[in-house]
Amino acid sequence: MTIFNVISLFGGLALFLYGMRLMGNGLKESSSGALKDAMEKVTNNPLVGFFLGVIVTAVIQSSTATIVLTSGLVGAGVITLHQSLGVIIGANVGTTITGQIIRLLDLNGSGGASWVDLFKPSTLAPLAAIIGILFIMAVKTKHAGVVGQIAMGFGILFTGLLNMTAAVSPLSESESFARMFVGLSDTPVLGFLAGTGVAFLIQSSSATIGILQALSMTGALTFSSVYAIIIGVNIGDCVTTAIVCSIGSKADAKRTGVVHILFNICGSVLIIVGLAVLRHMGVLDALWDKTLTSGGIANVHTVFRLVSAVALLPVCGQFEKLSRRIVKDDTQLGVSVERELELLDEKFFSSPALALSGAARAIGTMAKLSHEAVLGAMDVLYSYDQHTVDVINENEDRIDLLADRVDNYLIKLSPHVTMGNGNELLNFYIQCFSEFERIGDYAVNLTENAQELRDRGAQFSDMAREELRVLRDALDEIMGYAYQGFRTLDVRTARRIEPVEEVVDDLVATLRNNHIKRVRDGKCTIYAGLTFLDVLVNIERVSDQCSNVGVYTLSLSDSSIMSNHHEYIHKLHQGGDAEYNRRFGETREKYFGALAEADAKA
């Protein structure tokens, strides 16, 4: 075997790894929404979780991705550690599907009917690449790019396998190579370490099995020389996964990685003991020195993992108990947004729908906290309460923390989100989170207005206080629509925001004129009057931010609105929309009627 064969071998390995990643990323992207829904519906039955783990891993072609996503969901509190057990075990079985696909290499040597030739890797590889490039360059449908990516990945994967097979073909005549594998039969510990090391280095059990399947074309691999390697692959693969699960995670998220290691160690011990017993009984005599093909290696890999899963699934609860002893509980921080922060986990980047869902929840919490803060600040203007002010300030710290984390998270997520609905949601969330952050800032401004009045011993007139109550109700309504519209992406709710916003503007203008008149007539002090005008400015800005959220929400279903934002609003205010006119009239009558009643009381 020359240096050129070695270069070809590693070049083929590079193509194989890239093709597997390309195909896996395309499959994850196309199934991201379904994956999110499925993972969130895991029940407490480990058997259901097992089948879910098998299916999800078979679809996305990566047990590491499945377990890392599961770890993230556990850390975020979406599912419990107990619910994750079956998924983890199922993922170990699901990853063997890649080897079963690669067994098509066996068809290279067959000379059957012409239709069988279609499934040979030498035919499938270029055919998949042709289909992939046609979808990428010629088809303009919504999901064409993803389909093309999957097909191209499949083609590149098999091209890499064919290169590796061609590169190692001279080894079939090498006595040294044959003796090396005979040596592994005599010292299975070396095979175990080799399998563990390679799987750890390339971070993929499927790729390691793929390399073995390529080497099987030399005819030098027997069951006795490779079984230890296949067992070692299980350990090397789970160590990498456990490390990824442990980085910056909560205790239960770390425990998912520990459970994965414990399961694979126990499964490996079980297989080793089982093989020793069967060998002693003579059951394996016919298989022990049998030459394995690509399909044989795939079958051994699948059987080993399936037997481990079936044997250990009934006692998986013991892995949970042991993991709790190994990983101690986190210190409780008592922060109300802790769960939202856990959802902003980079582990979800492999499934953009999950990542976007976490961002949406965090922004929704910002909206809720800012809503409560504004209403609390308005109450403080009537009757100052230091505890309420402290709560509002704490809420503002939480809003700012979430805003900072969401901002960084969405920026890092953006390269993982392709064009289409996911990209539109990403832009929508980037636009919305800053609006809710500003509303929180205005709530703090209102508490500062209240503090200024208290410090100077000033107060608003009875009429001013009644007017502010009317404005408070209007703010409650418009912020409720903004939160609900953001949370549900409901167009009808979003359309209800602008009529209220225009009424708030009219109320602010009317109240400003009323208050200037009261100051001029000596019914209110100049300082209280200036503070009141400052309060009106903050209220108007809260309303404006809600209006922006409404426009962003509507733009998801009509992109022309965002490109002509001001023109759209201008047409509404000029009476160009019958529904807007009706709602504006009803809202104006509601709040100006309440204002007239307040004036009558005062």
Image: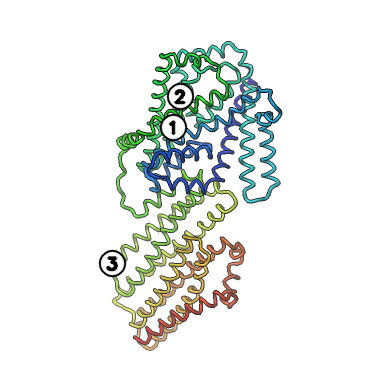
**Residue hosting label 2:** 231
Expressed as whole percent of the image width and height from the top left, the position of residue 34 reads 51, 47
Near mark 3 (Cα within 10 A), the count class, few <14, some 14-19 or many ≥20, is few
Dot 2 or dot 1: first in sequence order is: 2
Seen in the image, is 302 located left or right of residue 599? right
Question: Is 277 drawn above or below residue 419 in the view shown?
Answer: above
Q: Give the residue pinned by disc 3.
A: 386
- Looking at the image, which residue is at 68% across and 41% down? 133
Q: Mark 1 points at which residue?
A: 238
Q: Which of marks 3 and 1 is in front?
A: 1
Look at the numbered disc 2 and give the secondary structure of its residue. Answer: helix
- Rendered residue at 28%/65% (across/down): 387
**Cα separation between marks 3 and 1:** 53 Å
Amino acid type at mark 1:
Cys
Along the polypeptide, which appears first: circle 3 or circle 1?
1
**SS at badge 3:** helix
User: For residue 502, which numbered disc appears in the image?
Assistant: none
Taking depth in this image into account, of 282 and 380 the one nearest to the observer is 282
* Image quadrant occupied by the N terminus: top right
Task: From the top left corner, tell me how far across and down residue 359 is, in percent.
Answer: 46, 53
